[in-house]
Structures are given as structure tokens and as C-alpha cells.
């Protein structure tokens, strides 16, 4: 094993990596590769000097031990489960969420960079309907999506809005703490797994005795935690949490799947009564570079409660209910993606790739393209055909008056050639 690296040396390496480019979200350390950074979803080398330094297993182990800092709980998790989670602060400059894990007999690390500033709803450009979420007084709010799609950031923005507007006690159970909320109007008690509590079920039970109005559960991973969260939402607490699902209907099925078939109907009824919002989100590539946050939002009304309580069928689908409730600020992924395409923010290929209902997405893109083509066509007036005006008829010569006396027989006058030519010219 190489010499143990010091925290000062570790901080110098991390500082050089995050200063190498804008938009860095993750730092990766894997044996056989140089240190890498993830920028807008793509792995890059931070600098030519660093890219020439291929990491060994011993070097990564030295870095990992500097972060673990002899924490017995982290060492035990790494030994028993093959991975451990913690946080790391870089000289008050920024913080990281760290996952240390074993792969191919060596240690590896991923450090997710956390923003020092707690985000706001405006900073994330979230729709106005998101402000209605924080007005709820009880029930469950789920923010869903895959890993690395900004669920924690959205939750931080929602809690920040509560912190700015409400005088309540907020208790968070996190693994690890990612955003440090200042003490504004609300009072925050932020607890970290492994340091302040040791499992989510016990931590959530204890939270119910800590007089909170709002509870954040970093992630609901098992039946027991979900059961306690349902109880908390039913007893006057507003509970925020995350699930790794991609749509509202999949979220309902994931929750029901945590319970037995015999419990399903009872859980449906409880969920129909306590669920307030499901927020689905994805980060998709923007047309000009970077990534765009695309969301799905479902609230609670009579139709959603019925669909959750008795189940969906052909005439009672959550996706259709969401799209029919645009006036309430709800929207599906397909509606959000279509708007982004029409605004020129993403390409049609990206919309198809990240849509949930691909046939519907394709149909709507075709309709939007056809509508756009018709608009462009009618905007340019067609060329006009110019027709030469007909020549005016020549004046008919005035005949002298006929004297009614006994005139001699008058022969019939011959047709006037000039008048006939004028009439013909008018018909040509």
C-alpha cells in the first residue's frame, strides 16, 4: 500500500478537479483510469496532467481512508455491505456526497458535488404550481426519478420555500446531509444516517416525537419506513420523500409492491386519502448544450383518489387525469417535452428518448410539426397572377336625327368595322 494521503493533499486534488471546468456534477475514481469528472452527463478528463495519472487500487484506498477518517460505522458498512455513504466538506468551498464501494477487488469512489447555496424554486425554473405544494399542511409528497436527476435539489428548493414563509419545525432524515438549510423563519433539525440516527424506521419514529410539522425522509427503501410515513401523513404531518420511479402510476405500483396482496386494498385507501403530490423529473440534454429539467406533476382530486383507491382501468388512467388537469397546473412528461421542443430547447429525438408514452409522444410531435408547417406556409402569400385589363370599347358614332317627314326609302346601314373590332378586342 502507498503512503497514507493527508486531507490537505486530498483537498488539493479535489480543488484542482472542480476548478478544471464549469458544470461538473461528479468526481470519479476507478482503478485503471485517471481521475474523471462528469460534465452534463459525460465523463471527461479534468486536465492533461491529471489525465496521465492512471489510478491504482492502493491510491484509491488511501483517498477513501482519508475521507472515512476512522469512522467505525463507515468502515463496518464497507466491510459488511461492500459500500458506504458519507459527506465530505472541501474547506467551506463546497460539499460532496460520497459513495465508496468495492469493484473487481479494489475500492472505487464517486463524489457528487453539492451546491453551497440552497436552491430556490425560481433558480430551478419550476412551474408556479410547485408553490402550491408547500402550502399543504399534511399528507405525503413524493419526488421521483432516477439517480442523478436532481430529486434532492428539488426537495431542497421546496424546503427552502417553507423555510422562507412558515414558522414551523422541520426534521430531516438524510443519508447523508446534502444541503445545509439556514435557520430562517422555520427551525431545522437535520439528522444524518450513521451519525445522528442508525436506520430510517427508528429515525422516523423518533421524529414523530420531536414536534415537527414537516418531515423529510431522504429515501423510503422498505415497507416499515413506508408504513410509518403513511401514519405520519395521516396524523397531521407533511412528509416529503423520494422514490426511484419514472411516473405517477409507477410510483403507486412501487408503494403497493412494498406490501402484501392481502394489504393492498387497505394501503390503496390510505394512500388515496394521504397522497398530496407526486413530482416526476428528468434531466435531459439541451439542444445547445447543458441539461434541462423536465417534470411531471400530479396532485390530488376526486378522480385521482378514485383511481388510486379502486385501481386504474381503460377509462380511469392517472396519465389521462393528469393531462386533463392542465388548468390546475398539472402536466405529464409528454406535455413538458412537447413544450420544450416547440420552444427550441430540445430536439425531437431527445423528446422521444425521454418520454414515458412513446407512441403518444410521436403522434404529438407529428401534429406539432404539421401545424408548424401550415403556419409557415400560410404566412407567405402566394404569388398573384397579373391579368391585363381589357381595352375600353370605342364610342359609338352619334347618328344624325331622322326627320319624320316623308323620307325616301332608307337602306339598312352596313355594320361598322371599327365597332366590331372594339367588341372583339374586349372579348380577347
Image (tube, rainbow, N blue to C red):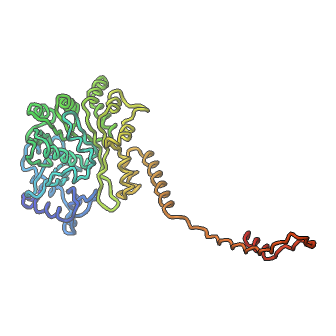
Q: Nearer the viewer, residue 355 or 118?
A: 118
Residue with the most extreme bottom position = 418
Q: Residue at x 27, y 58 (%)?
A: 40
Q: Nearer the viewer, residue 360 or 424?
A: 424
Indicate left or right for 95 with 247 as reference. left
In the rendered image, which quarter is residue 205 located in? top left
The relative height of residue 345 versus residue 86 in the rendered view (above or below) is below
In the rendered image, which quarter is residue 172 located in? top left
Indicate left or right for 284 with 427 as reference. left
Of the 4 image quadrants, the one containing the C terminus is: bottom right
Indicate left or right for 227 with 192 as reference. right
The relative height of residue 328 versus residue 110 in the rendered view (above or below) is above
Of the 4 image quadrants, the one containing the N terminus is: bottom left
Indicate left or right for 319 with 389 as reference. left
Residue with the most extreme right position = 409
Position in image of residue 16 (x %, y %):
15, 64
Position in image of residue 255 (x %, y %):
28, 33
Is residue 253 visible from the viewing direction of this image?
yes
Q: Residue at x 27, y 30 (%)?
A: 271
Position in image of residue 248 (x %, y %):
32, 39
Position in image of residue 166 (x %, y %):
13, 41
Q: Residue at x 10, y 32 (%)?
A: 206
Residue with the most extreme front position = 405
Is residue 4 visible from the viewing direction of this image?
no
In the rendered image, which quarter is residue 45 located in? bottom left
How many labels sit on residues? 0
Amino acid at each position: 500500500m502507498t503512503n497514507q494521503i493527508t486531507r490537505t493533499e486530498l483537498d488539493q486534488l479535489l480543488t484542482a478537479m472542480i476548478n478544471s471546468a464549469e458544470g461538473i456534477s461528479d468526481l470519479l475514481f476507478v482503478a485503471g483510469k485517471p481521475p474523471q469528472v462528469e460534465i452534463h452527463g459525460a465523463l471527461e478528463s479534468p486536465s492533461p496532467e491529471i489525465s496521465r495519472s492512471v489510478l491504482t487500487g492502493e491510491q484509491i484506498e488511501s483517498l477513501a481512508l482519508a475521507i472515512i477518517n476512522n469512522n467505525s460505522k463507515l468502515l463496518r458498512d464497507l466491510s459488511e455491505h461492500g459500500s458506504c455513504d458519507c459527506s465530505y466538506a472541501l474547506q467551506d468551498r463546497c460539499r460532496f456526497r460520497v459513495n465508496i464501494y468495492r469493484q473487481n477487488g479494489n475500492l472505487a469512489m464517486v463524489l457528487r458535488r453539492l451546491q453551497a447555496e440552497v436552491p430556490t424554486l425560481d433558480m430551478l425554473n419550476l412551474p408556479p404550481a410547485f408553490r402550491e405544494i408547500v402550502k399543504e399542511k399534511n399528507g405525503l409528497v413524493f419526488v421521483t426519478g432516477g439517480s442523478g436527476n436532481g430529486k434532492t435539489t428539488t426537495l431542497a428548493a421546496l424546503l427552502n420555500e417553507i423555510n422562507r414563509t412558515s414558522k414551523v419545525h422541520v426534521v430531516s432524515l438524510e443519508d447523508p446531509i446534502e444541503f445545509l438549510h439556514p435557520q430562517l423563519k422555520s427551525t431545522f433539525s437535520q439528522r444524518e444516517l450513521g451519525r445522528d440516527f442508525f436506520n430510517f424506521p427508528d429515525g422516523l419514529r423518533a421524529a414523530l416525537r420531536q414536534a415537527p410539522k414537516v418531515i423529510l425522509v431522504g429515501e423510503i427503501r422498505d415497507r416499515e419506513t413506508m408504513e410509518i410515513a403513511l401514519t405520519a401523513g395521516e396524523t397531521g404531518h407533511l412528509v416529503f420523500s423520494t422514490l426511484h420511479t419514472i411516473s405517477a402510476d409507477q410510483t403507486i405500483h412501487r408503494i403497493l409492491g412494498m406490501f402484501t396482496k392481502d394489504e393492498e386494498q387497505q394501503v390503496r385507501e390510505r394512500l388515496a386519502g394521504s397522497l398530496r403530490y407526486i413530482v416526476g423529473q428528468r434531466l435531459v440534454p439541451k439542444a445547445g448544450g447543458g441539461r434541462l429539467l423536465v417534470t411531471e406533476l400530479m396532485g390530488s382530486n376526486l378522480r385521482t383518489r378514485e383511481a388510486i383507491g379502486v385501481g386504474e382501468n381503460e377509462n380511469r388512467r392517472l396519465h389521462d387525469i393528469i393531462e386533463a388537469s392542465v388548468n390546475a397546473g398539472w402536466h405529464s412528461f409528454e406535455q413538458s417535452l412537447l413544450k420544450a421542443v416547440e420552444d427550441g430547447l430540445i430536439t425531437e429525438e431527445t423528446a422521444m428518448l425521454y418520454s414515458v408514452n412513446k407512441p403518444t409522444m410521436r403522434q404529438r410531435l407529428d401534429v406539432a410539426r404539421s401545424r408548424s408547417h401550415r403556419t409557415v406556409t400560410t404566412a407567405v402569400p402566394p404569388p398573384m397572377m397579373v391579368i391585363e385589363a381589357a381595352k375600353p370599347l370605342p364610342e359609338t358614332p352619334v347618328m344624325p336625327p331622322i326627320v319624320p317627314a316623308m323620307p325616301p326609302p332608307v337602306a339598312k346601314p352596313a355594320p361598322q368595322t371599327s365597332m366590331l373590332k372594339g367588341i372583339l378586342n374586349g372579348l380577347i
